Image (cartoon, helix red, strand yellow):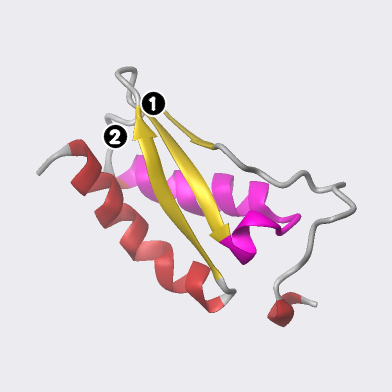
Amino acid sequence: MSLLDQVEAALDTIRPYLLADGGNVSVEEITSESVVKLKLLGACGSCPMSIMTLKAGIEEAIKKAVPEVKAVEAINLTDIDDPNAVLPENMR
């Protein structure tokens, strides 16, 4: 199983939670240094809590399932203080 397949399998374990809030995530790149670069989609892309989702949920799931991964980064994190950030409907 390729590194990408392993990362996708790890993401599939948490996707139901992301989808429940109207979000998702896609793998954009896995670098030669084993850094996974993700794009947060849907509600996750504009949520001020996206940094928490990335660190406590997504990164933890990937690193637990794929120890070779050195880091997980999002290419489009929304800053918690961004005035344009929008919480998912069920978190308001």
Secondary structure at numbered mark 2: loop
Spatial distance from mark 1 to mark 2, Cα to Cα? Answer: 8 Å
Residue 41 shown left or right of residue 1 in the figure: right
Number of residues whose C-alpha sits closer than 10 Å to that of mark 2, classed few (under 14), some (14–19) or many (20 or more): few
Number of residues whose C-alpha sits closer than 10 Å to that of mark 1, classed few (under 14), some (14–19) or many (20 or more): few
Point out residue 80 in the picture as x, y percentages from the top left corner.
80, 48
Q: In which quarter of the image is residue 45?
A: bottom right
Name the residue nearer the viewer: 46 or 67. 46
Point out residue 31 in the picture as x, y percentages from the top left corner.
34, 24
| Helix, strand or loop: magenta stretch | helix
Q: Which residue is drawn at 84% across and 55% down?
A: 84
* Labels 1 and 2 touching (C-beta < 8 A): no
On screen, 16 above or below 25? Answer: below
Q: Quadrant of residue 46?
A: bottom right
Q: Residue at x 29, y 34 (%)?
A: 67
Q: Which amino acid type is marked by label 1?
A: Lys
Q: What stretch is highlighted in magenta?
A: 42-64
Point out residue 35 in the picture as x, y percentages from the top left corner.
39, 27
Q: Quadrant of the C terminus?
A: bottom right
Q: Which residue is drawn at 73% across and 76% down?
A: 91
Point out residue 71 in the picture as x, y percentages from the top left corner.
44, 29
On screen, 79 above or below 32? Answer: below
The residue that label 2 is drawn on is 67
Q: Residue at x 37, y 45 (%)?
A: 62
Q: Is residue 60 magenta?
A: yes
Secondary structure at numbered mark 1: loop
The residue that label 1 is drawn on is 70
